Image (cartoon, helix red, strand yellow):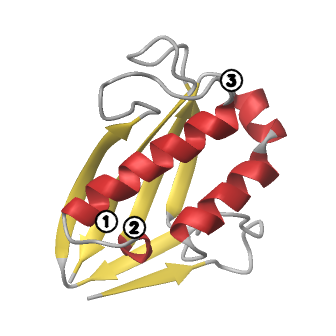
Amino acid sequence: MSLDRLNPADLSPPTGFSHAVVATGGRLVFLAGQTALDAEGKVTGSTLPEQFEKALGNLLAALRAAGGAPADLARVTVYATDVADYRAHAAELGRVWKRLAGRDYPAMAVIGAVRLWDEECLVELDGVAVLP
């Protein structure tokens, strides 16, 4: 199994994502949307960076349960209730990503959402991984 991350020179330079990820061989794992819920179903963190860290940690926990690792992520979608706030914290969120998931960036998108399932949640992440 391999994931080839492609970033064509004629596209804007990517920061914290890859423009394309080509997966060959392996099994697909679809990861449900994860928010800042703890094991008891309570929302943790009141700021976007705090909630992003918990949501990413939850996404990676689901991935580990499937036998995967952060480098196996091919696609992640981020749903944010305030895209301007997300952009304002982009550097800090990037540091959280690097600490938890490393530098093998999947194809990504950030989508503005009016609200998420749990009204207190500011961010949700879902993803697709390819495992050997």
28 to 43, vertically: above or below: below
Q: In the rendered view, does 120 fall on the left or right side of 82?
A: left
Q: Spatial distance from mark 2 to mark 3, Cα to Cα? A: 24 Å
Q: Residue furthest front?
A: 40
| Mark earlier in primary sequence (2, 3) | 2
The amino acid beneath tag 2 is Leu
Q: Spatial distance from mark 2 to mark 1, Cα to Cα? A: 4 Å
| Mark earlier in primary sequence (3, 1) | 3
Q: Residue furthest bottom?
A: 1
Tell me if mark 2 has few (under 14), some (14-19) or many (20+) residues whose alpha carbon lies within 10 angstroms of its own.
many
Which residue bears the numbered disc 3? 82
72 to 124, vertically: above or below: below
Q: In the rendered view, does 53 fall on the left or right side of 32?
A: right
Quadrant of the image for the N terminus?
bottom left
Which residue bears the numbered disc 1? 129
The amino acid beneath tag 3 is Asp
Q: Which residue is found at the position 77% from the left and 65% from the top?
A: 12
| Mark earlier in primary sequence (2, 1) | 2
The amino acid beneath tag 1 is Ala
Q: Are marks 3 and 1 in contact (CB under 8 Å)?
A: no
Which residue bears the numbered disc 2? 73
Q: Spatial distance from mark 3 to mark 1, Cα to Cα? A: 26 Å
Report the front residue among 82 and 19: 82
- Res. 55 mark: none
Q: Secondary structure at mark 1?
A: strand
Tell me if mark 3 has few (under 14), some (14-19) or many (20+) residues whose alpha carbon lies within 10 angstroms of its own.
some
Q: Which residue is found at the position 43% from the left and 76% from the top?
A: 71
